[in-house]
Image: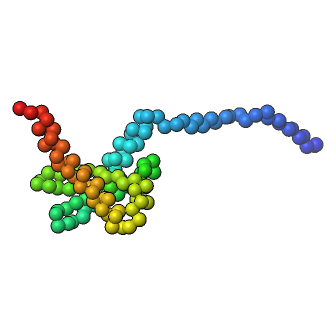
Amino acid sequence: MFDSYQEVIRVGPERVDVHEHRAPTDESIRLYREMLEKARTEVLRSLLVDTKLGPFRVLQVQDPTGDGPTTKLAFMLNGQEFSTEVQVTNLERLQSHDRDRLIDLYARRLAEAIADALLAPVLTEAMRGP
């Protein structure tokens, strides 16, 4: 006939969930960069720019950890595909106020990279000798 009242006092939670947040390991960073490079390569294959010299594939990637955008370039020359990447730092971009100066800077860097891609196998073979 009378209402009973029972009070339960709990000292702590019955279940404690601990979430452990770890820093990424070298292996996970390597896998991340590998997947990122593979994705960029796939995107590069899909971006085609047709020029007088032939078809070029160009991709500009902004890496948040880098010092500026990286321009990736793939092109066919004499039936062989070459690929290279050129990075112009943020400081160089700021110093090149004029658009023409910035284009000239990219052109010089791309020319150096293309020459390196074309001449590296030849010079390697020449260094071996007979």
State whether residue 28 is above or below residue 81: above
Q: Is any atom of residue 58 visible in this view?
A: no
The image shows residue 26 at horizontal and vertical percentages of 43, 34
Q: Residue at x 91, y 43 (%)?
A: 3
Marks counted in the figure total 0
The image shows residue 14 at horizontal and vertical percentages of 71, 34
- Coloration mode: rainbow
Q: Nearer the viewer, residue 56 or 3?
A: 56
Q: Quadrant of the N terminus?
A: top right
State whether residue 84 is above or below residue 5: below
**Left or right for 9, reference 84:** right
State whether residue 74 is above or below residue 130: below
**Left or right for 127, reference 17:** left
State whether residue 48 is above or below residue 80: below
Tell me the quarter of the picture where residue 28 sits.
top left
The image shows residue 48 at horizontal and vertical percentages of 25, 62
Q: Residue at x 38, y 67 (%)?
A: 98
Q: Residue at x 24, y 52 (%)?
A: 112
The image shows residue 15 at horizontal and vertical percentages of 68, 34
Q: Is any atom of residue 98 visible in this view?
A: yes
Q: Residue at x 13, y 43 (%)?
A: 122
Q: Quadrant of the C terminus?
A: top left
Q: Nearer the viewer, residue 130 or 62?
A: 130
Q: Residue furthest right?
A: 2
